[in-house]
Image (tube, helix red, strand yellow):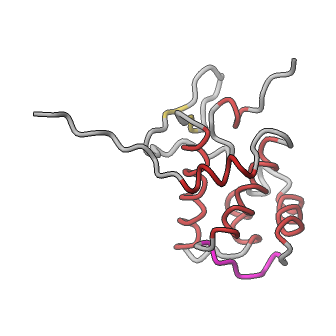
Amino acid sequence: MSELPRGIRNNNPGNLDFAHQPGAHLETGVRCPRFAAFPTMADGIRALREQLLHYGQRGLTTVAAIISVYAPASENATGAYIDLLCSRMGVQPGTTLDLNDAQTMRQMIDGITLMENGPGHVTLPQIDQALRAQPALPQPAEA
């Protein structure tokens, strides 16, 4: 059996760099740790949503603008990444996206997880469930 992709092993299907995201820790078991590891796949999916929303707040609202920052050409086949997302979403690279729209967010996350991990690792129902659920919040200690 082949080894699972790093993003799947880390419950981080977007391969987000570790940036002290809530609940995350720096991945372990690799020579050069860089990526966040989340407790559950749903947590990793929600962290990806938060990253995309953050990009939108910074004015990055097209597939081309988002992916050029998210997956820079110095590390990725950025043009192919943009083409895949646009094809799957039915938009042009410069089309302004409403990242607060649930369907748009679902499609972005689906395409990103496919590019980052290959097919067959993250399903649309899994994405839908994660985006509907609220993250578990720590309960206050009783006095």
**Furthest residue in direction left, as rendered:** 143
Q: Which residue is located at x 58 percent, y 73 percent?
A: 100
42 relative to 86 in the view: left or right? left
Numbered range of the magenta stretch: 93-99
Corner quadrant of residue 136? top left
Q: Which residue is located at x 54 percent, y 36 percent?
A: 38
Q: Quadrant of the N terminus?
A: top right
85 over 93 or under it: above or below: above
Is residue 130 in the magenta section? Answer: no
Corner quadrant of residue 67? bottom right
Q: Which residue is located at x 52 percent, y 73 percent?
A: 57
Is residue 94 in the magenta section? Answer: yes
Q: Quadrant of the C terminus?
A: top left
Query: Residue 23's spot in the image, x, y percent?
Result: 44, 39
Query: Residue 7's spot in the image, x, y percent?
Result: 70, 37
Q: Which residue is located at x 85 percent, y 42 percent?
A: 118
Query: Residue 80's spot in the image, x, y percent?
Result: 89, 59
How many numbered tags mark residues here? 0
114 relative to 19 in the view: left or right? right
